[in-house]
Image (cartoon, rainbow, N blue to C red):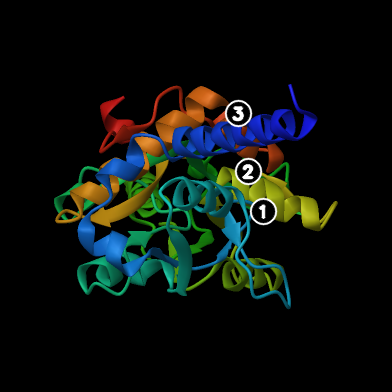
Amino acid sequence: MNQGIIRKLMLSAAMTAVFAAAGAQAGEGAKLVPDAVRQAGKITVGSQQTFPPIEFREPGASEVTGASSDLLHEIAKRLELKLEYVQAEYAALIPGIEAKRFDVASGGISDTEEREQKLDFVNYMLSGGSAMVRAEDADTYKTIADFCGKSVATLLGSRVIMAKVEEASAACTAKGGAEIRAEQLPSAPDARMQLDLKRVDAYLGDFPALVYMGGQFPGKYSIVGGTYMLTPYITSWGLSKDNAGLRDAMKTTLQEMLADGAYKTIMDKWGVGGAMLPEITVNLPASKR
């Protein structure tokens, strides 16, 4: 056979394989994207962008990075859409979805039965609330019960953590002790600053974020009890209840990424492979597991 014809046949076969692979990558999720989202050509994501290693911006950088960001970019790619971030404080994420400012609420938001009354959640990571203290106080605190009469900082809108603080504070006063004072702040850097200034005794936040933050300042901070968890919860992406098509497209695509290894690769890249879920779910908070 003529060598030119052979080369053409080989090129044709290679291109066919490329297109077949592209089609396979798009997967079933792409078929579920709502017409309105398809026409817009993008998924808009509301995020505080201060939640390393899950979703954050490096100092001086404009691009959002982190495990959630990588997962969302890969999902958008497979859905044949672009991804666009909108900066929003943590407490403004749910109102932002309700006001249609963005399609997805991200950046460490957890699925709870209470929040499910307003939003639907695509669950993508197991996490938990923990406490970070100054290194010199590492031996002083073992659990939240040791903070009677002390002060803690957490983020505005952190209802799961605040519920545990209120429960522990009530136990303090029931035993004749002083309550736990809680200050809710707009961002993680604000909370860490209050800890540095000794205006609070601990910063309560997501365990992966606290570990990452502590790693940026060796010897300066300590996690209470080493790995102490106030409460487990499921980190998720929140969507409007009238956006079930996009919700299902994201869930299906992430499930495909779990099957083909892309989910694990991204989670391992950011040191949170141990927080992977065995199955991608919708509206399945820690309280139901």
Q: Residues within 10 Å of mark 1 (few under 14, many from 20)?
A: many
For the residue pair 214 and 242, the one nearer the viewer reads as: 242
Please say if the residues under marks 3 and 2 sit with CB atoms less than 8 Å apart.
Answer: no
In x, y percent, where is residue 100?
A: 24, 72
Q: Is mark 2 on a helix, strand or loop?
A: loop
Q: How many marks?
A: 3
Mark nearer the N terminus (2 vs 1):
1
In this view of the protein, can residue 225 be seen by the observer?
A: no
Q: Nearer the viewer, mark 2 or mark 1?
A: 1
For the residue pair 1 and 225, the one nearer the viewer reads as: 1
In this view of the protein, can residue 278 be seen by the observer?
A: yes
For the residue pair 178 and 60, the one nearer the viewer reads as: 60
Residue corresponding to mark 2: 141
Question: The disc labelled 1 sits on which kind of residue?
Answer: Val
- The numbered disc on residue 11 is none
Question: Rounded to the nearest whole Å, what is the CA distance between mark 3 and mark 2?
Answer: 25 Å
Mark nearer the N terminus (1 vs 3):
1
In x, y percent, where is residue 196?
A: 71, 69
Please say if the residues under marks 2 and 1 sit with CB atoms less than 8 Å apart.
Answer: yes
Q: Nearer the viewer, mark 3 or mark 2?
A: 3
Residue corresponding to mark 3: 274
- The numbered disc on residue 133 is 1
Question: Residue 264, located in which quarter of the rendered image?
Answer: top right
Residue 47 left/right relative to 110: right
